[in-house]
Image: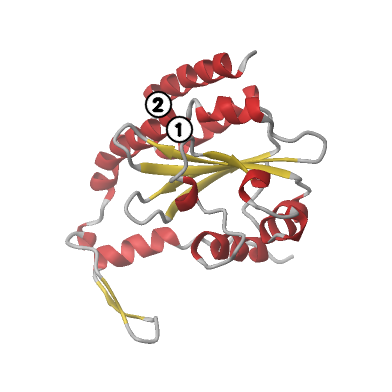
């Protein structure tokens, strides 16, 4: 199938998913499954992004658990730090297509780069393509990363097919957030009403926070897995 026909098929399927899913998590899982059936990858993730700050707000992964601690720190350093290897979503959002392979983004032997040595290689991966999902409103609502193990890299047809559907994914992410907002409002506890305000001191520690802010912060902190002793 040509890249244009592949993109057309993906656009149609993403629109159907957007209409048939109830929340952002379900939408992201379904989109990752659909892409995987048409453009194979070994590990994939889609993250919701705050359009104003380009900060990740939640992530869905397929093919792997959350990155190990060292890799997670590297991801944060690349996205929000000053690394010369920064292949950030913010930078990618300024490109025409919003889709780019790691070898297009990094002008050196990628084996000498942080993204390869501390993220791809430890997970047995050899290639990566990144995507930003900009809706028709012009705002970026999410970003994605697809990885492949050694043996087959993402080619120009893969990139073109993905570039042809990122707009629909952006619109779908926005729609999924709109659909979820009434439920979040209904689930909000009475004690969590009012503004969400956090005051941070000079030592970067929280000095005070309103009840609503505490509620939001608790959602951001992952719960530690439970374990039992024999």
Residue 142 in the image: state x and y as whole percent: 44, 43
Q: How many marks?
A: 2
Quadrant of the rendered image containing residue 117: bottom right
Q: Residue furthest left?
A: 194
Res. 18 mark: 2
- Labels 2 & 1 near each other (Cβ < 8 A): yes
In-image side of 72 versus 166 (left or right): right
Res. 27 mark: 1
Quadrant of the rendered image containing residue 161: top right
Q: Quadrant of the N terminus?
A: top right
Q: Quadrant of the C terminus?
A: bottom right
Residue 85 in the image: state x and y as whole percent: 62, 60
In-image side of 229 versus 161 (left or right): right
- Residue at image point 39% right, 86% down: 203
Residue 206 in the image: state x and y as whole percent: 35, 79
Q: Is 107 rendered above or below residue 37?
A: below
In-image side of 125 versus 223 (left or right): right
């Amino acid at each position: 199938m040509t890249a244009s026909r592949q993109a057309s098929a993906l656009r149609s399927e993403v629109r159907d998913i957007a209409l048939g899913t109830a929340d952002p998590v379900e939408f992201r899982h379904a989109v990752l499954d659909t892409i995987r059936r048409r453009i194979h990858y070994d590990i994939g993730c889609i993250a919701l992004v705050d359009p104003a700050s380009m900060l990740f707000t939640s992530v869905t992964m397929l093919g792997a658990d959350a990155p190990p601690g060292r890799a997670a720190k590297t991801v944060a350093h690349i996205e929000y730090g000053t690394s010369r290897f920064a292949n950030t979503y913010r930078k990618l959002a300024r490109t025409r297509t919003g889709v780019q392979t790691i070898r297009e983004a990094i002008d050196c032997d990628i084996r000498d780069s942080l993204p390869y040595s501390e993220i791809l290689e430890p997970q047995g991966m050899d290639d990566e393509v990144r995507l930003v999902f900009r809706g028709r409103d012009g705002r970026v609502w999410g970003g994605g990363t697809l990885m492949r193990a050694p043996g087959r890299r993402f080619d120009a047809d893969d990139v073109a097919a993905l570039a042809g559907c990122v707009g629909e994914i952006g619109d779908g992410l926005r729609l999924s957030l709109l659909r979820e907002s009434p439920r979040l409002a209904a689930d909000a506890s009475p004690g969590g009403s009012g503004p969400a305000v956090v005051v941070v001191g000079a030592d970067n520690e929280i000095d005070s926070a309103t009840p609503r802010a505490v509620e939001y912060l608790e959602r951001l902190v992952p719960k530690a897995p439970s374990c039992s002793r024999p």
